[in-house]
Image (cartoon, rainbow, N blue to C red):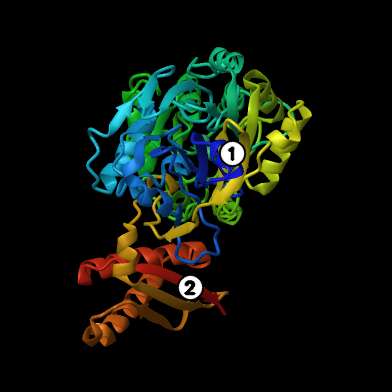
Amino acid sequence: MTRRARGSAQRQPRHKLEVVPLGGLGEFGMNCAALRFGRDIVVIDAGVMFPEEHVLGVNIVIPDFEYLFAHAAEVRGILLTHGHEDHIGALPYLYEKVRAPIYGSDFTLGLAARKLREHRLPHDRALKQVRASDEVKLGPFKVQFIQVTHSIPGTFSLAVQTPVGTLIHSADFKMDQTPIDGRTFDFQTFSYYGDHGVLALLSDSTNAEVEGFTESERSVGAGIDALFRRARSRVVFSTFSSNVHRIQQVIDAAATHKRKVALIGSSMNSTAEVAQSLGHLKVPPGILVEPKEVRRLAPPRVAIVAAGSQGEPMSALSRIALDDHRDVSLQPGDLVLISARAIPGNEKSINRVINHLYRRGAEVIFGGAAPYHVSGHASREELKILLNMTRPRYFVPVHGEVRQLYSHARLAASTGMPRERILLAESGDVVELDERGGRVSGKVPVGRVFLDGTLEEVDEIVVRDRRHISEGGIVLAVVAINRRTGDLVGEPEIVTRGFVDAEARGDLLSEAARVVRKSIGAATPEERADRGVVKALIQRDLKRYFRRSLDRRPMIIPAVVET
Ligand SMILES: [Zn+2]
Ligand SMILES: [Zn+2]
């Protein structure tokens, strides 16, 4: 061996930390990252992405977990930062093949357990509840959970000590100085790590283009209260069911203004139940009523909290808007507040729901901004504070499309961070950190896996097993609808792929066409005028038909043509 060769062999670092983002960098949602040191891996989050409307028949998108499946035996733990869908929605698909212990707060694990139950995955011993400041040792990693504020209870940032240095993953956060539950952002611990040296900071870029500070969740309370004060009839309120602090403020306003509250939608009810049982949601006795009691109460004495703030076609709010809800029928004078920002891609669906609500005679406030909504994510000033508190050697912007990642990188540079220490990576890029420094080097396979789900509510999606799609086949249902009357034009056309029972096919197709005719026939003219609703109805009924008659679960793709 020549001296030169030996020299380079010596320089070859034996200890390196690899940060492998599998989703969420350069795209919105689907957050998932692996930290790898030698033959040990910890996974941070396993989220979904909500597909854009034009992806026919697809309701949910998960990261391609090929990399983690290939290294399943090396995974020491799955760390969940919080319970939002873009962080835990894909957990069942990961956990199905990677049976590692799952760490998170009480509320995060409460929601995660519900998902694993829906997928019939045994998990009781896998769930490891941690509290703020707890430390967990996983192979060469020592993980500390740091309390932060966000739009869901029980959110943690992570400090991961590794043999080459400490990595901080911010998760989603904002610096709310007056949080509803009094659990404040843990500035001290971030400063502690800053003082002791941080190798790398991975930080949330969602609001990297938003100037200033994000307002406190508490400021929404005043907006809600003012609304309750002027409402003369019912108040219908819609937000994400996981936004427990906002629902708390609605319940508080209802108590002040002597209204009863009905929670409508299965995700709204089950999330509230988890939140209440853990003490995150405090409900004064006697204030909650069953949805069916709404009809009996005088309108000025009622507040309704409904799921469906993203315009999901089969959600409670959507059904109410179409006057197709068992318990709630809107009347002129009712006030509807949608207290949420539109997730990119959902604008059209939300708009449709708002149009229907106006047809019912309701006054509609789409509160995408203060005083009816505030973001759960840190704005530029808060992002600078985190950078300055932790003073990392390397900075990797995460959670955002490319434009947000670039803005966050420029923002970091403005705090004095040298450009060469800001590492811009996208999903699939491997960020290497060792004693020689940090760099983006290498790639792992990443991608998106499309699944269809029942079109219930966004955070109540019971998605089918990925395996079932290849086994269940595909059904395409094409219907033409008269734009003016909403009537069916001609026969529905049914095309199937992946069905082996060839002899049954003729009957099967004509029977499926009959099912589609029936779903459209049963819809009201208003529903028929709404392509999103028509598609959802066809999907629901065909799904039921194939399950009942053939015990099959094909992927169903409805296409509606207006003539
Ligand atoms: Zn997120
Ligand atoms: Zn979040």
Residue sitting at 39 percent across and 81 percent down?
A: 495
Residue sitting at 45 percent across and 77 percent down?
A: 478
Residue type at numbered disc 1: Gly
Residue on which disc 2 sits? 559
Residue 402: x percent and y percent? 66, 48
Residue on which disc 1 sits? 7
Quarter of image, res 467: bottom left
Crowd class of label 2 (few under 14; some 14 to 19; many from 20; radius 10 Å): many
Residue 376: x percent and y percent? 57, 31
Task: Report helix, strand or loop for mark 2.
Answer: strand
- Decide which of 452, 317 is in the foreground and name it: 452
- Decide which of 238, 343 is in the foreground and name it: 343
Residue 557: x percent and y percent? 43, 69
Residue 336 visible to an observer of this rendering:
no
Residue type at numbered disc 2: Ala
For marks 1 and 2, give the CA distance: 64 Å
Quarter of image, res 142: top left
Residue at the extreme front? 2
Task: Report helix, strand or loop for mark 1.
Answer: helix
Residue 245 visible to an observer of this rendering:
yes
Crowd class of label 1 (few under 14; some 14 to 19; many from 20; radius 10 Å): few
Tag in front: 1 or 2: 1
- Decide which of 87, 4 is in the foreground and name it: 4
Quarter of image, res 404: top right
- Decide which of 563, 378 is in the foreground and name it: 378
Question: Would the CB of label 1 be found within 8 Å of ligand 1?
Answer: no
Residue sitting at 26 percent across and 43 percent down?
A: 117
Residue sitting at 36 percent across and 51 percent down?
A: 69
